[in-house]
Image: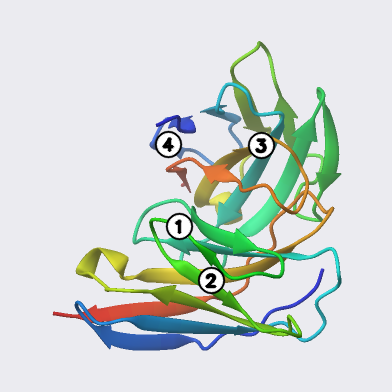
Amino acid sequence: EPEVTQTPSHQVTQMGQEVILRCVPISNHLYFYWYRQILGQKVEFLVSFYNNEISEKSEIFDDQFSVERPDGSNFTLKIRSTKLEDSAMYFCASSVWFRGSTEAFFGQGTRLTVV
Amino acid sequence: DAKTTQPNSMESNEEEPVHLPCNHSTISGTDYIHWYRQLPSQGPEYVIHGLTSNVNNRMASLAIAEDRKSSTLILHRATLRDAAVYYCILRSRAQKLVFGQGTRLTINP
């Protein structure tokens, strides 16, 4: 069964450092998303991406965040200068289409720890 | 984003059916009702979705009220592996899924 793959599973970084979280969405999917979940809290939407551009972003997704689809398979989330409060699980997801009838498939997540 | 209301937690016994309720009184005509679940230390997982008619798949059944203001996710025979947080989400043309707090389901052996 096709799945969304995320690497690394766990990343520890020092405050102020740049991190790149990587995702390989399901191959025929067109819409890509990043979500985050701070420990003990709900899953929060960060950004959606279609046709090589951001289609929607949340207030959390400020100038410190960027997304990119550098090739035909990878989808990355970059945090330029990490803060302690960026520590969270980051989930990548993909959908074939954006309509309400379409399900999203999530990866297993990257646990980011900022120290 | 249209809102949903779910109980914070529910408990059931293994091999018994589980009915997880969701209220969505402000649902619009184009909103699909989606259910996802999140097992401990894992990413959200799609369970089922529907628009107006009841739906069945290998994981669960979805019963939708005639006025669409509420729905119920039915796990026919719960196993310990079904212990998770279950999210009821309305999705229309908006691309994102908006997660609430969900219902934490505990399954007793």
Amino acid type at image mark 2: Leu
Residue annotated with mark 1: B57
Chain bearing mark 1: B
Chain bearing mark 2: B
Image label count: 4
Q: Quadrant of the N terminus of chain B?
A: bottom right
Query: Residue A11: which numbered mark, if any?
Result: 4
Disc with the residue nearer the chain's start (4 vs 3):
4
Query: Residue A81: which numbered mark, if any?
Result: 3
How far apart in space, not on screen, are marks 4 and 3 (Cα)? Answer: 14 Å
How far apart in space, not on screen, are marks 1 and 4 (Cα)? Answer: 36 Å
Q: Mark 3, mark 1: which one is toward the viewer?
A: 1
Provide the secondary structure element on which disc 1 rests.
Answer: loop
Residue annotated with mark 2: B62
Residue in the foreground of this view, choosing between B33 and A49: B33
Crowd band around label 1 with a 10 angstrom C-alpha radius: few (<14), some (14–19), many (20+): few
Say yes or no: labels 2 and 1 on the same chain: yes
How far apart in space, not on screen, are marks 2 and 4 (Cα)? Answer: 38 Å
